[in-house]
Image: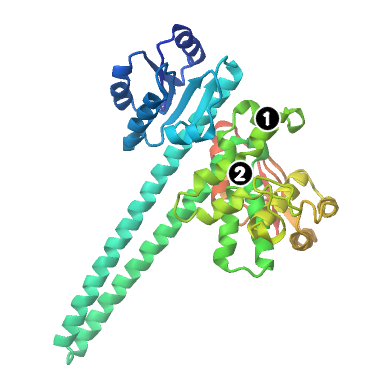
């Protein structure tokens, strides 16, 4: 059975025939479901009935009408995340954008490629926000269930206390009540474990989505997370602080989901300056997507600053030295190191990569972070000594195994690089790819 593809719903509000014809031509692909509204009196009713993902509006009316229209839309909870793009012949001021609730402007005369890219980028972000909101809703429901059980446990404790007063002389009854209390406590522990597992599953799911966005660099986020955890531990951080850095590493490229395929599929050397700037904004998009969700706020802050330089010349905020979060400094170095060694096969290549990064100490990178990165390479090189390999069936893969060679599909796509330590999410990704693009027979793993 073929799954029905969910279309993007777009509402275009204009009484300008040339504008209407332009967007009829631009949005004729099957992935869009588009309606056009010309009447100001009917537009709010159409919006509330259609519930669009994105609204494109061209109003030849006073500014107050534009403000009122957006305010009416934003008051409807179902439309609070709907993207609003306003057509204008002149770039509006930032204050006007904030005041009216408009997300962005489409400036006449239109540039077809820019308009299409902007619409698709916003629609991807909207879809991702909807998915994250749904996941957050499910997590909140789990939390609500946990609170209900905590309340039940509190009421049970009160009832048990009353019973103990009545039956204090009965050792048998006291033993029974204690057993029931232990059962209730055990149940609460299980609920806490379920909540933690659901949260970790969500992080792993998002990391897998990021990997699928760029299959030619599959495993990058997981490798950066492994290196970042090692370095953070060397700084003596608590387990929770290390976990926050690890989560940020797994999700540090989530902002790239909203970037157009045209840019993502280009060789970095072929990108225009404008495209490079668009790509460079992904940490801010990533922060925006994650900061509103319980448990991801600290990771979001770390992601925001992964392009800061130690000498203060980076972006977005020009932070310098220790003002840059430690997690951001670690992920910056780990990510660059993994990209430099993605196809490396010998310890010497890894050591040369560290030496190259050290050339930018005190300008781009933190020297303390690079010293610990060198220790990571030392342990990696030690593990390579005296190791042998074994080929196993794809169905025998287990968490913790380390790939002895690059993993390719039958069509030649490099799925995961050698040296990757397999996790539950990476194994699921391998199995899913194998269904549509089978892997070559036998997977080489390292035998310790």
* Label 2 Cα neighbours within 10 Å, binned few <14 / some 14-19 / many ≥20: many
User: Any mark on residue 442, and which?
Assistant: none
Q: In terms of sequence position, does the residue under pointer 1 or pointer 2 come before the other?
A: 1
Residue 409 in sight here: no
Q: How many marks?
A: 2
Residue 324: image x %, image y %? 66, 56
**Residue at (59% x, 32% y) in the render:** 259
Quarter location, residue 443: top right
Q: State the residue at coordinates (62%, 68%).
A: 237
- The x, y position of residue 428, in whole percent, is 53, 45
Q: Secondary structure at mark 1?
A: helix
69, above or below 181, in the image? above
Q: Nearer the viewer, residue 116 or 189?
A: 116
- Which percent across, then down, holds residue 245? 60, 57
Residue under the image location 42 percent in, 16 percent down: 60
Q: Nearer the viewer, residue 11 or 410?
A: 11
**Residue 95 % position (x, y):** 50, 35
173 displayed left or right of 285: left
Labels 1 & 2 near each other (Cβ < 8 A): no
Please name the residue shown 55% across and 31% down the image. 436
**Left or right: 43 as drawn, with respect to 398:** left
> In the rendered image, which residue does mark 2 sit on?
283
Task: Give the side of residue 434 with respect to residue 349, left or right.
Answer: left
Callout 1: few (<14), some (14-19), or many (20+) C-alpha neighbours within 10 Å? some
Q: How is the image coloured?
A: rainbow
Which quadrant: the C terminus? Answer: bottom right
For the residue labelled by badge 2, is the local secondary structure a helix, a strand or a loop? Answer: helix
Report the residue that reaches farthest toward the bottom: 169
* Image disc number at residue 275: 1
Q: Residue 320, can we see it?
A: yes
In which quarter of the view is residue 13 placed?
top left
**Residue 261 sits in which quadrant?**
top right
């Amino acid at each position: 059975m073929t799954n029905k593809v969910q279309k993007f719903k777009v509402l275009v509000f204009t009484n300008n025939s040339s504008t209407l014809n332009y967007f009829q031509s631009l949005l004729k692909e099957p992935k869009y479901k588009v309606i056009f509204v010309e009447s100001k009196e009917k537009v709010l009713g159409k919006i509330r009935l259609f519930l669009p993902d994105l609204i494109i509006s061209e109003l030849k009316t006073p500014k107050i009408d534009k403000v009122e229209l957006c305010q009416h839309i934003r008051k409807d909870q179902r439309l609070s995340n709907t993207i609003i793009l306003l057509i204008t012949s002149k770039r509006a001021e930032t204050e006007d954008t904030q005041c009216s609730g408009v997300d962005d402007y489409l400036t006449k005369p239109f540039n077809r490629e820019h308009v299409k890219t902007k619409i698709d980028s916003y629609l991807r972000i909207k879809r991702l926000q909807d998915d994250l909101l749904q996941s957050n809703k499910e997590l909140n429901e789990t939390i609500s269930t946990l609170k209900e059980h905590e309340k039940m446990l509190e009421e049970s404790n009160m009832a048990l206390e009353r019973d103990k007063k009545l039956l204090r002389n009965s050792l048998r009854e006291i033993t029974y009540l204690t057993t029931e209390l232990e059962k209730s406590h055990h149940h609460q522990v299980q609920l806490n474990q379920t909540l933690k597992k659901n949260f970790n599953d969500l992080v792993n799911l998002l990391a897998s989505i990021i990997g699928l966005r760029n299959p030619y660099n599959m495993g990058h986020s997981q490798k950066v997370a492994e290196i970042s955890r090692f370095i953070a531990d060397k700084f003596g951080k608590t387990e929770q602080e290390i976990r926050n850095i690890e989560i940020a590493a797994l999700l540090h490229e989530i902002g790239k989901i909203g970037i157009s395929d045209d840019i993502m599929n280009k060789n970095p050397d072929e990108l225009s300056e404008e495209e490079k700037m668009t790509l460079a904004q992904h940490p801010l998009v990533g922060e925006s997507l994650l900061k509103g969700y319980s448990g991801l706020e600290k990771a979001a802050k770390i992601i925001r600053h992964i392009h800061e330089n130690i000498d203060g010349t980076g972006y977005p905020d020009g932070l310098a030295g220790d003002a840059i979060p430690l997690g951001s400094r670690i992920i910056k170095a780990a990510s660059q190191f993994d990209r430099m060694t993605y196809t490396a096969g010998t310890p010497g290549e890894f050591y040369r990569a560290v030496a190259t990064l050290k050339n930018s100490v005190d300008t781009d990178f933190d020297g303390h972070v690079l010293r610990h990165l060198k220790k990571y390479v030392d342990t990696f090189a030690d593990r390579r000594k005296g190791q042998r390999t074994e080929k196993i069936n794809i169905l025998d893969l287990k968490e913790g195994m380390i790939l002895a060679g690059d993993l390719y599909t039958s069509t030649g796509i490099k799925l995961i690089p050698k040296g990757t330590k397999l996790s539950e999410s990476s194994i699921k990704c391998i199995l899913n790819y194998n269904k549509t693009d089978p892997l070559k027979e036998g997977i080489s793993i390292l035998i310790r």
